[in-house]
Amino acid sequence: MTNEEKMVMKAKIAMVFTPSAPIDNKALFAGRKPQLTKLINAALQRGQHAILFGERGVGKTSLGNVLHDFLTPVSEFLIASTNCDAGSDFKTIWNNILNQLTVTESETGMGYEPPVRSEEIPLSRYLSDKPSPEEIRQQLEKLAQPAIIIIDELDRIKDRETTAHLADTVKTFSDHSTDVTLILIGVADSLDSLIAEHESIERALIQIQMPRMSPSELMEIIDNGLKQLKMSIELEAKRRISNLSHGLPHYTHLLALYAAQAAVDRDSLEINQADIVTALNEAIENAQQSIRKSYIEATSSPRGNLYTEVLLSCALAETDEMGYFPAVNVRAPMSKIMGKPYDVPAFSRHLNDFCEKDRSAILQRTGFPKRYRFRFGNPLMEPYVVMKGIVSGRIGPEILESGEPVIHASDETPSLFDQSEPGGLK
């Protein structure tokens, strides 16, 4: 390939693998069949609404984005969406939504003459200064077609009155069989807050948990993207991307992006393991500034304080379905990394420090003393910590296949590259 051809191909790759943006193309969507089925059921049944909840970064927004494409062969829906923020209140949320939905107003002629003028008017024009859930229902019933309304990042709403009004909106839509489906998207706390405001909405609200993606679903993302690009990938390289991603599609897109571009750089349309090495280093080098800053704040300490090793052990600890792990689950990976037994008292202070602001509150803590459970506040941090551990040589990449970290007894940072096999991973 010429340099120009390579740049064009790299641009195409960047359009397919999009780590910083949710999927909005049905052809690139992968996995999530059980969740998609539940969402379709909610959209096609009057009086039913849905809330998608799960960790950040698991693909909730992408699922909401492609729902319309799957429903189009069955029925035509209007669709509107909005993202909430800390300042969102009930009126701003619905003003954003109703501004996307219009009704036709016609100026009639004299007698039997046809209308002289018609105009598409956004429903937001009719919104009062302090709209109620009942007013919202009445406005939406003016629509000529059924509608799907997506309210994303529900967990960012700080105003309890707004949450209460949204719960009442679900209730009134359901009670009146309004031909509108609400899709609410947030973390688990969003569901708890919503139901706390109106327990009777549970029967009208399909609760859809979005767990992290399975390895097969992540590999489907890679296959779908490469199919669009007419590229291929070695099976072991594909597995490595999947394992590095820790169930988060963001990292699958990120590593596939850099690996595919690395393959193009060497005049190939097939990704191999050497390209994964390149992608791993690129992912670390170009990680979000907030991730890099939090990692540095969490691990910076005089030599010998073990913050880096303990955080890496946390990233390797076995978790429950909500991402939490008890301190005892850190013991095994910590002992493997350090090459000698480590028990909880040796690192319990570090775990508690990671929950403090001066350590970037990189971990969240729940429970009570001696029964605390921890998880990463930002799920995207967990794979980043593991990738840093591989690049720095604290663990070998084989941990991702075997579950056993490769221990390096020396304090020196070994190379990630195996000199006996150029471009290969140790």
Image (spheres, rainbow, N blue to C red):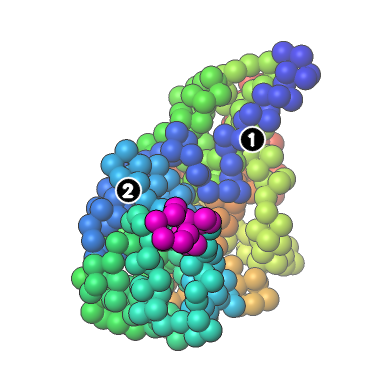
The residue furthest top is 1
Alpha carbon distance from label 1 to label 2: 26 Å
Please give left or right for residue 171 compared with residue 152 in the image. Answer: left
Report the disc number at residue 36.
2
Residue 374: image tag:
none
Left or right of residue 98: residue 290: right
In magenta, the rendered stretch is: 102-118
The amino acid type found where label 1 is placed reads Ala
Residue 227 place in picture, x, y as percent: 49, 24
Residue assigned mark 1: 14
Locate the C terminus by quadrant. top right
Nearer to me, 261 or 157: 157
Tell me if residue 299 can be seen: no
Q: Residue at x 30, y 55 (%)?
A: 43
Helix, strand or loop status at disc 2 = helix
Q: Is residue 234 left or right of residue 214?
A: right
Q: Is the residue marked by circle 1 packed among few (<14), some (14-19), or many (20+) residues within 10 Å?
A: some
Residue 284, image x, y percentages: 67, 46
Which of disc 2 and disc 1 is earlier in sequence?
A: 1
